[in-house]
Image (tube, rainbow, N blue to C red):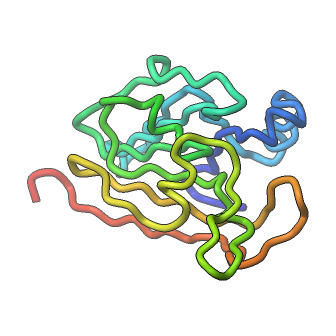
Amino acid sequence: MRAPLGVFAVLGNHDHWAGARAVEAALGDVGVEFLTNRSHRLPAPFENTLLVGLDDHVSGYPDPDAPQWDPTAATILLMHAPSGLLDVGPRPFDLALAGHTHGGQIRLPGGFAPVVPEGALSRRYLAGRYALPPNAHLLVTVGIGNSGLPIRLGPVPEILVCELAGVRPGT
């Protein structure tokens, strides 16, 4: 992937199980910067945009006090699972990006509950866009992988491309 301002990631449960250091090293070799419990302010002209990453809620060690939070910045929160919201608490962000749920990897007809990976908020925020109080949004992607069984019934694999737009303060 090529991106003029960088490619950023956080670890997920499978990354931890496979060996977090090895995953970070391999992806770091191709230019991916990990924001594991870190923040990164984008360069000008986007200097009012802050990326904050948290380690995986289920298999990692999320530390929401480690990143520098800035309530005046447009903040994009990277976390593997929606349950990472429980770690964030009252800290300010505008958009949170997550996956982990696979959209309910197996959805049987007849109203049966979807099969979802572990996580306190995995069913509540299964896939899609959610408005969060007071003025934030959560975007949960179905992704392309699977959990455990190498099968999907229902959710179509996806890669989301998001274009964010905003206005400069004072305009």
Residue 96, horizontal then vertical, whole percent: 44, 49
Residue 36, horizontal then vertical, whole percent: 62, 30
Is 1 above or below relative to 122?
below
Query: Residue 37 falls in which quadrant of the image?
Result: top right
Is 76 above or below relative to 4?
above
Query: Residue 71 falls in which quadrant of the image?
Result: top left
Q: Residue at x 28, y 40 (%)?
A: 73
Horizontal placement of 2 versus 78: left or right? right
Is residue 91 visible to us here? yes
Horizontal placement of 25 versus 104: left or right? right
Is 119 above or below relative to 21?
below
Q: Residue at x 10, y 60 (%)?
A: 171
Horizontal placement of 22 versus 128: left or right? right
Foreground residue among 64 and 155: 155
Is 170 above or below relative to 17?
below
Q: Residue at x 67, y 74 (%)?
A: 158
Query: Residue 130 falls in which quadrant of the image?
Result: bottom left
Is residue 103 visible to us here? no
Foreground residue among 13 and 11: 13
Residue 25, horizontal then vertical, whole percent: 84, 34
Q: Residue at x 71, y 45 (%)?
A: 32
- Count of picture labels: 0
Residue 16, horizontal then vertical, whole percent: 80, 33
Q: What residue occupies the far left of the structure in this picture? A: 170
Q: The N terminus lies in which quarter of the figure?
A: bottom right
Foreground residue among 64 and 75: 64
